[in-house]
Amino acid sequence: MNFLRTLFWVVVAVSLAIFANRNWGDVTLNLWGDIQADVKLPILLLLIFLLGFLPPYFLMRSRVWNLKRKLALAERPTPVAVPEPPAEENQEALA
């Protein structure tokens, strides 16, 4: 199974490398006013992907962290209070 996972990621990496190599051209972005930016297409696609991927990823990680914290708190054993003997018995034991 580990081999198939490695093979999948190798195929994805090679596909992305071929895509980036074949599409390594400038894209002109018209920003505000007369400002323009020339960006390579694969870099622009990577930035757009990260812009869409990172907020849900951080949200998911924060929820997992919160649930693990709550689970650890629920699994912690509750302390049991040991009742002290009445004061009269303490006096007799000292005498």
Image (cartoon, helix red, strand yellow):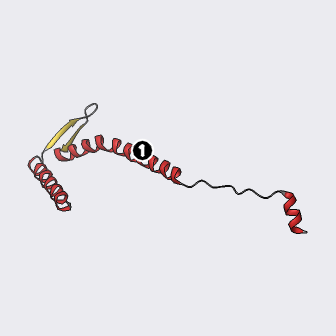
Residue nearest the observer in this picture, 83 or 51: 83
**Residue ranking furthest to the left:** 22
Name the side, left or right, on which 71 lies relative to 52.
right
Residue sitting at x 85%, y 63%: 90
Q: Is residue 31 above or below residue 82?
A: above
Residue nearest the observer in this picture, 18 or 79: 79
Q: Which residue type does callout 1 highlight? A: Arg
Query: For the C terminus, which image quadrant?
Result: bottom right
Residue nearest the observer in this picture, 47 or 27: 47
Name the side, left or right, on which 20 lies relative to 92.
left
Residue 84 location in percent, x, y?
A: 77, 58
Residue sitting at x 74%, y 56%: 83
Name the side, left or right, on which 71 lies relative to 26.
right
Task: Tell me the quarter of the picture where residue 33 sits.
Answer: top left
Residue sitting at x 38%, y 42%: 59
**Residue ranking furthest to the right:** 95
- What crowding class fits label 1: few (fewer than 14 Cα within 10 Å), some (14-19), or many (20 or more)? few
Q: Which residue is mark 1?
A: 63
Query: For the N terminus, which image quadrant?
Result: bottom left
What is the total number of numbered labels drawn onto the structure image?
1
Residue 56 location in percent, x, y?
A: 34, 41
At mark 1, the secondary structure is: helix
**Residue ranking furthest to the top:** 33
Residue 49 location in percent, x, y?
A: 25, 43
Q: Is residue 48 above or below residue 5?
A: above
Residue 57 location in percent, x, y?
A: 34, 45
Task: Tell me the quarter of the picture where residue 27 sits.
Answer: top left
